[in-house]
Amino acid sequence: MQSILKPYKLLLLVCSIIMVTGCSRQHIDDYNNTSPDFDVLTFFSGELDAKGVVMDRGGQVTRRFSVEMLGTLENKTLTLEEWFVFDDGEKMKRTWRIKQNEDGTYNGTADDIIGTAQGEQSGMALHWDYKMDLSVDGSIYRVVFDDWLYKIDENNVVNRSVIKKWGFDVGEVILSIRKM
């Protein structure tokens, strides 16, 4: 009888974990009617700079970095160039191409992003999801970025990205972005 109950106990445990983690996540609608309103294409047009940290799943800072950004808006498409410099000397460049759809959602592409990033904006917040092949200690891992950006005021946005693998949080990036 005990061996018959083991699969059910495991199923109950998995369902409980899914319910707890699913209920604790925020939704873009949580930010309806918040201010200041986050006009994503306008905010990221022009010169920006940012400072951030990368953390492991335990919250330990593993890297620090700076980013210079230049956004150009043309024909309702934002081209956002980002130049990263990490504390270990590594340099990296990413160029996003971001469009706002007629329904108000966003699509974005970049050379190191798998497929198309999908985003939704409401009030002061932007929620953005995308897949990326991430290099860690010489190995490549396909991960999902669950990206939240919050407009603080006309010149500042805070970005929190939870990095997931197989649905589990494996790291986090926190970034403060300032419009010049």
Image: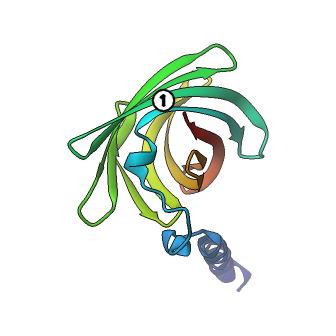
State whether residue 174 is above or below residue 11: above
The residue sitting at 60% across, 72% down in the picture is 18
User: Looking at this view, is 160 or 124 the one in front?
Assistant: 124
Q: Is residue 79 left or right of residue 140?
A: left
Where does label 1 land, which residue?
Answer: 69
Indicate the secondary structure of the residue bearing disc 1: strand
Please give the name of the residue rendered at 58% of the width and 55% of the height, measured from the top-left corner: 150
For residue 46, which quarter of the picture?
top left
Residue 75 position by quadrant: top left
Q: Which of 177 and 161 lies nearest the eye of the viewer?
A: 177
Residue 95 occupies which quadrant of the picture?
A: top left
Given residues 53 and 78, the one toward you in this image is: 78
Q: Quadrant of the N terminus?
A: bottom right
Q: Is residue 46 above or below residue 167?
A: above
Instruction: Categorize mark 1 by other alpha carbons within 10 Å: few (<14), some (14-19), many (20+).
Output: many
Residue 83 lies, in percent from the top left, at 50, 23
Q: Residue furthest bottom?
A: 1
Name the foreground residue: 132 vs 73.
73
Q: Is residue 46 left or right of residue 16?
A: left
Q: How is the image coloured?
A: rainbow
Q: Is residue 10 above or below residue 83?
A: below
Q: Position of residue 134 (x, y in %)?
A: 51, 33
Is 151 placed left or right of 47 in the picture?
right
Counting labels gives 1
Of all residues, the one furthest to the left in this rendering is: 75
Can you say whether 53 is above or below 126 in the image?
above
Residue that appears at 55% across and 55% down: 148
Q: Position of residue 27 (x, y in %)?
A: 53, 70
